[in-house]
């Protein structure tokens, strides 16, 4: 029985090219999860204000919100391997530069904002390209499994990343500057792994303008109400729910009397629970219960945030982070798998770019949530986040019932897409 479960859960790793991409993706996720701790701690230590932590996140949010749609167009037009190689190299340089400025005592909130803005621009291109590349490497049930395993990698790094970043920041010989240099080194390894992959295809090219391609992608989503609902649900849940990381440093310090660095423990616990939950649910990503499970995950996420706003001590918050990690990770994994299932391969980049806009909205929402926490307290901000997540989840479930069947219909013929079987590196 265990062998059968393992074979089903990890079946897409049998593909050698996907396995290389998955390893590189895992290292990239590890560096990004470390950066969330590093930038939050550095920003809070500079000024001691939640609002400034939100301002730092705002840079990345603005970039992703406005550039992600065009990043998806580019991902469908140019070789994804080349796009990822260039993008990851720039990420490594960005981390290295910030680390050097911290070590030279030249860092400021403005520099952190510029850094996160640059990261947002890069991420707007490489995130949809990475997920769209899965559609080239895997087909059928293996595609949903590959998307799920990508989420497993993300969740696993949410365990190691916070602890690794927290430990490196706490060690005098490395500190926050050394932590950024380590993150840059990890991304450099990612570039090496990507270089081992074969050339990728170009799904759409040439004749239509970028704006036309973008409009076609939007029509593709809007033309399928259930796909549009999936994208809208992801944007709503991520925009509000994932802002909890913005107020966690202040919540720990002001409400629980803990050091802001203990944020690493909370995110590590959430990551562990998310890893267990996503591995358990990976084999269900292409099954008939995937939609209901993603709804249940979002509901658990919202409930845990609401309860956290009333938590009286650190131990209670740790317990709630277990629920939060499991619910949020299952929702994200299954939502992304369902989005890929309902999308046509020629539109993978553009559809995933719309999904990734959620992180842009999230980065922008971090600022008002930070200001709300400063004006009232962190508990109120977390409560509002949870209520919004539950409202989005309830609205999504209601709309889903109105739409009826959860089976994907035959997709219409592609329009104005000049498919190319080859197309560079």
Image: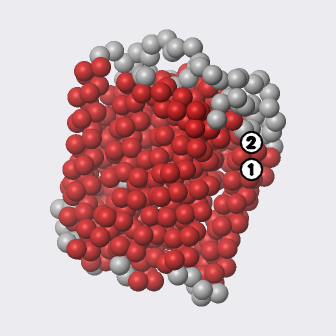
Rendered residue at 47%/35% (across/down): 336
Question: Which is more toward the observer, 221 or 194?
Answer: 221
Image location (x, y in percent) of residue 387:
21, 50
Question: Which is more toward the observer, 209 or 231?
Answer: 209
Rendered residue at 65%/23% (across/down): 417
Q: Which residue is mark 1?
A: 85
Q: Is residue 302 at least partly visible in the picture?
A: yes
**By what rule are the colours in the image chosen?**
secondary structure
Rendered residue at 66%/67% (across/down): 94
Q: Residues within 10 Å of mark 2 (few under 14, many from 20)?
A: many
Image location (x, y in percent) of residue 225:
37, 24
Query: Is 198 located above or below residue 380 in the figure?
Result: above
Q: Which mark is residue 52?
A: none
Q: Are discs 1 and 2 less than 8 Å apart at CB?
A: yes
Q: Which mark is residue 81?
A: 2
Q: Residue furthest bottom?
A: 105
For residue 400, side relative to residue 349 (left or right): left
Q: Residues within 10 Å of mark 1 (few under 14, many from 20)?
A: some
Q: Secondary structure at mark 2?
A: helix
Q: Secondary structure at mark 1?
A: helix
State how far apart marks 1 and 2 are (Cα).
Answer: 6 Å
The image quadrant where one finds the C terminus is top right
Rendered residue at 49%/11% (across/down): 410
């Amino acid at each position: 029985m265990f062998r059968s479960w393992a074979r089903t859960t990890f079946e897409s790793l049998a593909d050698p090219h996907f396995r290389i991409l998955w390893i590189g993706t895992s290292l990239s996720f590890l560096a990004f999860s470390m950066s969330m701790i590093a930038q939050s701690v550095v920003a809070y230590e500079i000024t001691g204000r939640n609002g400034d932590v939100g301002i730092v996140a705002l840079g990345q949010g603005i970039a992703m919100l406005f550039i992600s749609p065009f990043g998806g167009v580019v991902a469908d037009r140019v070789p994804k391997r080349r796009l990822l190689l260039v993008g990851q190299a720039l990420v490594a340089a960005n981390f290295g530069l910030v680390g050097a400025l911290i070590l030279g005592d030249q860092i400021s909130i403005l520099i952190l904002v510029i850094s996160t803005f640059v990261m947002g621009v890069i991420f707007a291109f490489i995130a949809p390209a990475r997920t769209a590349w899965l559609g080239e490497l895997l087909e059928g049930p293996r595609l949903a499994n590959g998307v799920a395993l990508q989420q497993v990698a993300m969740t696993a790094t949410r365990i190691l990343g916070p602890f690794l970043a927290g430990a490196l920041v706490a060690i005098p010989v490395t500190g926050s500057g050394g932590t950024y240099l380590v993150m840059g080194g990890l991304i450099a390894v990612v570039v090496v792994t990507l270089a081992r992959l074969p050339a990728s295809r170009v799904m759409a090219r040439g004749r239509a303008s970028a704006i036309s391609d973008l409009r076609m992608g939007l029509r593709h989503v809007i033309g399928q109400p259930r796909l549009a609902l999936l994208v809208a649900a992801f944007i709503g849940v991520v925009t509000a729910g994932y802002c909890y990381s913005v107020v966690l440093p202040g919540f720990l310090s002001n409400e629980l009397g803990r050091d802001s660095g203990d944020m690493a423990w909370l995110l590590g616990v959430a990551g562990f629970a998310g890893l267990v939950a996503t591995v358990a649910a990976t084999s269900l990503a292409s099954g008939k219960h995937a939609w209901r499970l993603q709804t249940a995950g979002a509901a658990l996420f919202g409930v845990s945030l609401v309860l956290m706003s009333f938590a009286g001590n650190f131990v209670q918050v740790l317990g709630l982070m277990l629920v939060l990690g499991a619910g949020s990770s299952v929702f994200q994994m299954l939502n992304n798998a369902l989005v890929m299932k309902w999308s046509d391969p020629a539109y993978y980049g553009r559809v995933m770019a719309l999904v990734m806009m959620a992180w842009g909205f999230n980065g922008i929402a971090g600022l008002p949530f930070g200001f709300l926490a400063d004006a009232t307290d962190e508990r109120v901000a977390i409560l509002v986040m949870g209520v919004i997540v539950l409202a989005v989840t309830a609205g999504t479930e209601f709309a889903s019932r109105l739409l009826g069947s959860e089976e994907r219909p035959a997709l219409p013929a592609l329009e104005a897409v000049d498919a190319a079987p080859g197309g560079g590196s």
